[in-house]
Image: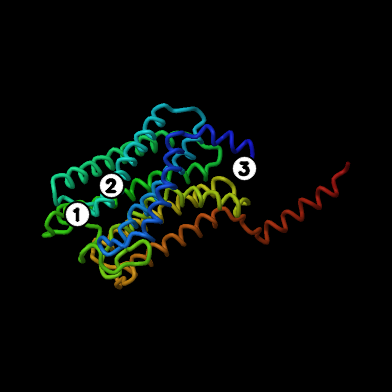
Amino acid sequence: MTSLAARRMAGWHRPLVVFTALMGVAAVVALIGIVTDPRVLTGVPIWLKPFKFAVSFGVYAGTLAWMLSLLPRRSRVAEWAATTIVATAVIEMAVIIGQVVRGQSSHYNQTTPFDAALWQAMGTAIMVLFAAQLVITVILVRQRQADRAAGYGIRLGLGLSLLGMAAAIPMVLPTAAPGTPGISGAHSVGVPDGGPGLPLVGWSTVGGDLRIGHFVGLHALQVMPLLALLLGRFAGRLDGAVQARLMLTAGAAYGGLTVLLTWQALRGQSLVHPDGLTLAAFGALAAVTVAATVAVLHRTAPAAPSFGDTVGAARLEGVAHEAPS
């Protein structure tokens, strides 16, 4: 790491940086628990949830710290919002890890008054986190970036990650996991939580799973800025306005993908077993995205000179040569 990069990182939001490091430690501890603790909860190793949340929160906090470092001037409101995010994330992780130690589920669990209080605390914390990120989003959206594509990457990443958070709302509606004693929500639709799922992520392979759209939307926070970086690196010949329009196209497609994945899950359909309607919807999204991308690139392509233009240019060149000096 260069001294310049080190100086820049020294100015990053300290609570977010410290929390990112703590989540790295938590991920290692949870990974050890996965290997050494034989307990299973909802069909998966009991320490898998803390591991996934530690990794996700760590990446999330690190990304926010980087984004705040791009502000031309310090914003106390944004810094307070970021500190609030850290506080709410600490509550989330404390409940998740504490419930694992107790051998209980952290999410949707209202089997006892104590478990219900923990779940309500988590629900309140995530709503506060959403509001705090919304504040940061508004502040960063209002800031002008020298690189238009990069600016769109940051704005789209923040906005789409809020969409990803909203995609989790159906998990806690009264219709989720109906008739299950002590359980007030579910991430699976049409099947009980804890059934057959994809490796590591655990997304259901036999029914709908709301975590998919939630995951995809949340990680727009990293995907959109990374896409802007790749555009600048490999499509540098395109001017800034073109790159910005391509970013808008990508953002619209990414948002559409998040909505379609959530819609598929709400219909009780597994990601790996789409029906004809789902395939048609994804095909339409892909076709519109390709068409929009081609249109953006076509607008920027220089028009080929016509025969008349070529002849006219030759005549002008001849006149220029014949003109007296």
- From the viewer's side, name the closer residue of 28 and 150: 28
Instruction: Determine whether label 2 and label 3 are within 8 Å by CB.
Output: no
Q: Nearer the viewer, residue 116 or 243?
A: 116
Amino acid carrying label 2: it is Gly
Which dot, 1 or 2, sits closer to the camera?
2
Q: Is residue 168 left or right of residue 291?
A: left
Q: Is residue 314 left or right of 90 when viewed as pictured?
A: right
Comes first in the chain, label 1 or label 2: 2
Residue identifier under label 1: 185
Kindly give the residue lying farthest to the right in the view shown: 325
Q: Give the mark nearer the N terminus: 3 vs 1.
A: 3
Which residue corresponds to the image point at 85% horizontal and 45% vertical from the top-left? 323
Tell me the mark number nearer the camera, choosing from 3 and 1.
3
Q: Label 2's element? A: helix
Q: How many other residues sit within 10 Å of disc 1, few (<14), some (14-19) or many (≥20)?
A: many
- Measured from the top left, where is residue 9 in percent x and y? 54, 36
The dot on residue 1 is 3
Q: Is residue 68 left or right of residue 268?
A: right
Q: At which x and y percent is residue 60?
A: 41, 45
Residue 284 is drawn in which quadrant? bottom left
